[in-house]
């Protein structure tokens, strides 16, 4: 599990996270040579159920716009977010984590040297 905590400028856990495209957060794990690209969502969140509902009801799959309609205004997202993932092979990776705070998308970037 990769755990991230979103904090405000005061260092306190952020209280203004909202679902982004029906999910609490999105993460991409990318190997420096481009041979690995994984898009991962947190597991077991309430927002996951909302996304599954959105996918089931959208004919021919759903777009981000359709999924965002599933997110209820006022839905609260926990500022501690975990993603299940395993690096498939050693190398340099960059991890992008995207959340939505008070209507704005924010992206955190992290580097990992996997041996
Ligand atoms: Cu995603």
Image (spheres, rainbow, N blue to C red):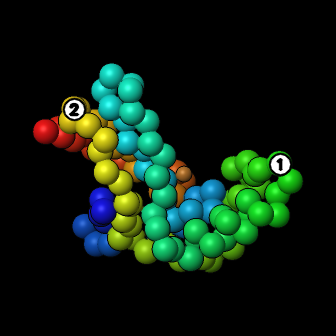
Q: Residue furthest right?
A: 59
Report whether 97 appears left or right of 65.
left
Separation (CA) of disc 1 from disc 2 = 37 Å
Where 111 sits versus 42, above or below?
above
User: Residue 75, can we see it?
Assistant: yes
> Could you tell me which quadrant the C terminus lies in?
top left
Label 2 near ligand 1 (CB < 8 Å) = no
Q: Residue furthest top?
A: 33
Q: Position of residue 2 (x, y in %)?
A: 30, 59
Which mark is first along the chain, 2 or 1?
1
Q: Residue furthest left?
A: 115
- Residue sitting at 48 percent across and 58 percent down? 41
Q: Position of residue 50 (x, y in %)?
A: 66, 70
* Label 1 residue SS: loop
User: Residue 7, can we see it?
Assistant: no
Neighbour tally class for label 2: few under 14, some 14-19, many 20 plus, Cα within 10 Å: few
- Residue sitting at 58 percent across and 59 percent down? 20
**Residue ID for mark 1:** 60
Q: Position of residue 71 (x, y in %)?
A: 67, 68
Viewer-proximal residue among 38 and 13: 38
Report whether 88 appears left or right of 76.
left
- Residue sitting at 39 percent across and 33 percent down? 36
Number of residue marks:
2
Where 94 sits versus 4, above or below?
above
> Are discs 1 and 2 less than 8 Å apart at CB?
no
Q: Position of residue 23 (x, y in %)?
A: 56, 63
Where 3 sits versus 77, above or below?
above
* Label 2 residue SS: strand
- Residue sitting at 30 percent across and 62 percent down? 1
Quarter of the view holding residue 14: bottom left
Neighbour tally class for label 1: few under 14, some 14-19, many 20 plus, Cα within 10 Å: few
**Residue ID for mark 2:** 91
């Amino acid at each position: 599990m990769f755990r991230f905590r979103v904090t405000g400028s005061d260092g306190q856990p952020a209280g203004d996270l909202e679902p982004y495209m029906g999910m609490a957060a999105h993460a991409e794990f990318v190997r420096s040579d481009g041979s690995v690209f994984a898009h991962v969502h947190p597991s077991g969140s309430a927002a996951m159920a909302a996304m599954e509902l959105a996918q089931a009801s959208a004919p021919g799959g759903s777009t981000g716009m359709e999924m965002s309609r599933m997110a209820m205004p006022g839905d609260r997202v926990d500022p501690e977010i975990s993603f299940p993932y395993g690096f498939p092979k050693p190398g340099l990776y960059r991890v992008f984590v995207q959340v939505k705070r008070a209507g704005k998308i924010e992206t955190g970037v992290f580097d990992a040297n996997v041996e």
